[in-house]
Amino acid sequence: MCPASARNVIISASELGAVLSGSTSISTPPVVLEVGRKNGDGVDPRHSYATGHIPGAHYVEFEADLVGTPTGSSGQGPLPEVGDLQGRLRDWGVDDGGTVVVHTRGNPAVAARAWWILRWAGVADTRCLDGGLAAWQAFGGPLDTAVPPPAAGTAVVRPGSLPVLTAEDAGRLATAGHLVDARSPEAYAGDPRRTGTGHIPGAYSVPGSDNFSGGRLRGAAELRALYADHLDGRAVGAYCGGGVSATTTVLALASLGVEAALYPGSWSAWITDPARPTTTGTDPGARPPAAR
């Protein structure tokens, strides 16, 4: 694979297949991670993994492995503890300076969150498998039921390798730059009759689902058109409900060579402080003065 770069954020199924089959000159194949997230239907996604996965892929449990312990002000998806994450990366066989490919069987936002966490942790050459496992199967890639044992990687976590916004940063960015809300239009608009709904004043709605078509990241021309109003050179940041969907915004912009910061706590953290302003409706709303 090519050296990591701002544009180098995804890999196609055919490219991954060539690497894993030894058809390229790459001496060290990437670590492949399948990320599963429980969705409340009682089905453990690990069972699907066990029935057949990309050969050599390790299973990653979204909540246990990529999310820290929530506190009263952290929001739903706080960052994982550095020591815990480093231990898991090593168990998955991730080496310092190595390459990782992440994917899911469904929602691409889950893979984007894994991509973001690993890059935030300093695993610079982390890619999302474009289209996830469905694309791998459509390509004709093989599946395996063998579960790889814990490995002995050498990864060193370097937190902060991608930019992060605090609540105060997000409020300021809504004034001085571009703050993108990646939730659905309905969640963004909220309901004026219900407290805790709506969006951060000054934030613009660009749903994270719009970054994809058929489960694959849209092409550069489509993404530039989607974000045209926010590519004027000023700083860009993203948030959502709990810090997952917004990582698709960061991923999409990274594919264009644009670095966007993530507000990990997102709306679920923003509303823990009643002093923070909120607004409802389909317009960004009055841009607030810089947050204190």
Image (cartoon, rainbow, N blue to C red):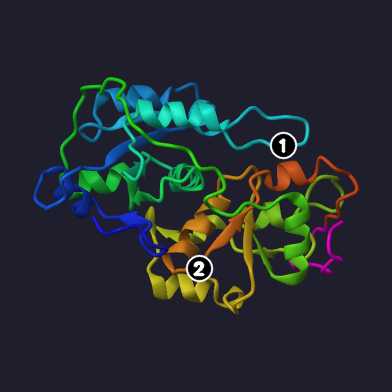
Figure quadrant of residue 184 = bottom right
Does 199 appear above or below 84? below
Dot 2 crowding, Cα within 10 Å, few <14, some 14–19, many 20+? some
x then y, percent, for residue 254: 46, 62
| Occupied quadrant, residue 102 | top left
Outermost residue to the bottom? 232
* Highlighted range, magenta: 279-292
Tell me the SS state at disc 1.
loop
Dot 2 amino acid type? Val
Taking 217 as reference, is 77 left or right?
Answer: right
Q: What secondary structure is the stretch in magenta mostly built from?
A: loop
Residue 74, numbered label: 1
Decide if residue 218 is in sight here: yes
Q: Badge 2 is on which residue?
A: 258
- 186 inside magenta stretch: no
Mark earlier in primary sequence (1, 2):
1
